[in-house]
Every structure is written in C-alpha cells, then in structure tokens.
Amino acid sequence: MKISFGKRIAAVALSAMMLATAFAGCTNGGTSSTSEGSASTDGSGKLQIQFWHSMSGNTQEALDAVVAGFNESQDQYEVVATNQGSYDESTGKFFNMANGDGSAQIIQIGEQNLQSMIDSGMIASVSDLIEKYSFDDSDLLEQEVNFYSVDGNMWAMPFNCSTPVVYYNKTVFDEAGVTEFPTTFEGITEAAQKVAETNDSITPVGMYAYGYALDQMVINMGGYVINNENGRAGRATEVAYQDQITAIYNWIKDLQDQGLLLNYGSDGTNTISGFTQQQVGMFIASSASCRNVIDSATDFEVGVANLPVPEGTEPEGVYGGGGALCVATGLDEEMETGVMEFFKYATSPEVQATWAVSTGYFPICNGAYDTDTLKTSYEEMPQLQVAADQLLNSNVNSITAGPLLSQLPQLRTDLQTALEAVFNGSDVESAVAQAVESTNSAIANANQGVTE
C-alpha cells in the first residue's frame, strides 16, 4: 500500500477534523529541538529529547518520575516531557507541525491514533529501530505487540496499557446473595434483579455511552469491529460489529426497561461518582481508573470483573489499549540512540512495575509481573490483578489485535451516539443502522486519499 505524502496528510486531516482545533494554545514548555536531529542541549550539555504526552494529574506525576529517573540514570540525554492535551489534541498538533522546528521526537498516542500516525508517514518503524539498535523486545507482552504491529512491523512502543472492566459494589451484591460476580449478560441481569429486591436505595446498574468499552465488548464476543480482519488483512472499508453491538444494546435496553439501569448519557465522571456514592451498584469503565475508584469508595468493598459476554459465548479476550510511544522520522543516529535508551529504561521491569502501582495501568513487559513491587501491590489491592489478568489471559489473534482504523474515534463516537439514542427510547435496530451509516461514510471518504 502506497500513500503519497500529500494524500497521507489529506487522509490524516479527515480524522483530525474531529479533533480539537485550538492547538495554538499548546506550548512546548521546554527548550525545543527539531525532529531532523539539529537538537539543542541543556546547561549540562545533555542532548535534549522532546517528549509530548497526554498524562495529567497523578498519572503525569508518575510519568514525570519515570522521566526524571531516566535523566538521572545517565549523563548523555535529557528527556523533556510536556503535556500537549488529549491524545487527539497532541497528535493533531504533531500532524500540523509536520516534524518541523519545536515538534516532538517522541509522542505518546492513544490506541485510536495508530492508523492515522502510520498514514501520516511521520513516524519511524519501531521494529526497524529495535533491529538497528539491538533492543531486546522479547519481554514485551505479546498482546500489546499484537495491537501495535501491522504485518509484523511494530509502529509504536507499548507504554501505558489499560482495558475496560466491570466495577461492582461487592458489599451490595454479597448482601443480595451474589457472592460470585456473573460473567454473562443474562447472569448480570439476574444478579441486578436480586439487588433490586434486597436494596431499594441503589440502582443495580449504572451505564454511560463509552465507545472504547463497546468496541472491546465486541472483541470479547469474538467479533471483528471492522472488516478485513479488523483492518489487519487489508485496509478496512466498513464496520463489521453489527451482530455483537445489537446484542449488547438489546441487553442494555432490557436492563433499562426493567428499571435496573440508570443511564448517565456519555458522562463517565458522573458515572464513577454515582458508583462511589452508592447510587448505582456497577458500571463499566477503563481499568486505568481502578486505583482511583477503589480509593474513592470508602464505605464499601469494590469488586472488579472481566467484561461479560452472552450465554453460550466463549470470551475471546481484549486488546491492549491505552497508549504507546511513537518516534518521529528524520532523526539522526545520536537522537535515535537516545530515544531507544529511554525506551529501554521506560519498559524495564522495575520501572514498569512502579509505573503500574502509581497509576493503575498494566505493565507492558512480563518481567514486571515478577517484581516484588507489583506482587506487593496486587496483594494489597487484588482488584488490580483481576484487571491485568483479563488482558494476560486474552487470546492473541487478528480479533484481539483490535481495530486498525484512522476513523476509530469517529466509530466510537457513532457507537456512543447510538447508545444514547437507545437510552432515550430509540429502537436498537435504527440506532445501530445510523451508527453503521455514519462510520461507513467516514471510512469511505478517508479511503479516497489512499491508493493500494
């Protein structure tokens, strides 16, 4: 597949139109350097490496600690980490700057940005860099490598991994006689009925329209989100989730029709607050929120469970979502060497274990799971291990490679809009049909800028 540079930018622009447009307000924050390798140094003479990221709050503090640890561990390189807003905002600015002065040498992306980054032609193959600099990648989780690789070529270095999970009020469910949390849609419905019968002060299920969780549920049910094997066997031309998403929406609608579900629209923050304040008994959200949810739930025990499937369906598993690190093209060898040294440090077992304990993300290397740091954390907070095991036990195939699509943000938005329509009384078939039409149109428009 060949994409001219002009067509690359055109294709990326179609996705970027959906992103925030106020990039001018984002500043670098450190001494800038060019992606072409004409780099500046700090006062100590270290070569500066600009690293754009999207972490905030406690995760930014944890990332700053990783960066500081690397900077203190050697005397040749200084990584300058700067928050550039959300994943979509940061990648949008990266596209606009086209690897020019002040752009990043390393950029953190969300899993939804992978195809757009590849299409842009502005990132280097991490597999090529691994081979060139003899980087040992044998310890990386195969589930993570599976997602960020296309035709055996890894385009981003896994870094902060998360997946959607079920959070539930174990205290309330135990009191209702549900001591083992169900693994199926039908089992959750039955458990919710028992909670409703024994506790009239709480709505058993809370739900918000969360596109990432919805496409992961499709994967877990053994379905492809998009055609051509999730875009892995060839560029996707249309969605393929109809059967699975229809089953998911029918289940949600049934819960709501029975009065067992409180919908929060598309507001994840209020959903979490509703859960910690015991307005609802369970909800689905990213595992990255695990530590925060548990710490905030001071009056009851929080349980964590895998994503459910319909009865008779064997769970396929999930793909390794979250974020990863891309490398800009055009760097000289000195800069590339520094980047790979940082990757070696940031993906090492102890660093990944500490990062995971501090944030709630999963380590992306096997060795981290053998460290005392992580073992102690999982002993103290076993819910974190439940969330990690969902990924570690997932099958590794084209289904769990996950969707490779530059319009993935659009696809998720369309799924969210459809679910909100169901919340508001629309029939499932019409809502799904509208989502399919919207996403397929966006895919077709974007593919016009791509030639085989």
Image (spheres, rainbow, N blue to C red):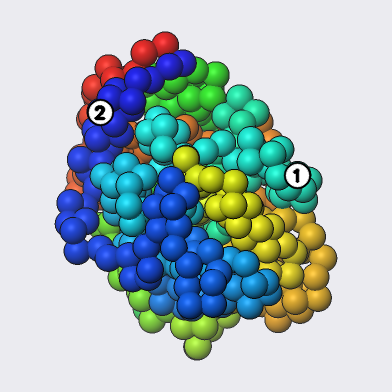
Residue wearing tag 2: 10
Looking at the image, tell me whether mark 2 or mark 1 is earlier in sequence order. Answer: 2
Q: Residues within 10 Å of mark 2 (few under 14, many from 20)?
A: some
The residue closer to the viewer here, 117 or 342, is 342
Residue type, label 1 = Ser
The CA distance from mark 2 to mark 1 is: 35 Å
- The residue identified by callout 1 is 134
Rendered location of residue 405, percent (x, y): 41, 32
- For the residues labelled 2 and 1, say whether their Cβ atoms are less than 8 Å apart: no
Above or below, 349 relative to 435: below
Residue 148 in sight in this render: no
The number of callouts visible is 2
Q: Residue at x 70, y 81 (%)?
A: 380
- Badge 1 crowding class, 10 Å Cα cut-off, few under 14, some 14 to 19, many 20 or more, is few
The residue positioned 28% from the left and 25% from the top of the image is 6
Q: Is residue 375 above or below residue 124?
A: below
Query: Which residue, as the protein is rendered here, is positioned at the far bottom?
Result: 299
The reply, left or right, for residue 24 in relation to residue 277 is: left
Compare residues 36 and 220 and report the one nearer the observer.
Answer: 36
Q: From the image, which quarter does the C terminus lie in?
A: top left
| Badge 2 amino acid | Ala
Where is residue 43 shown, x and y percent of the image?
Answer: 48, 77
Q: Quadrant of residue 199?
A: bottom left
Of labels 2 and 1, the one closer to you: 1
Q: Element type at marker 1?
A: loop
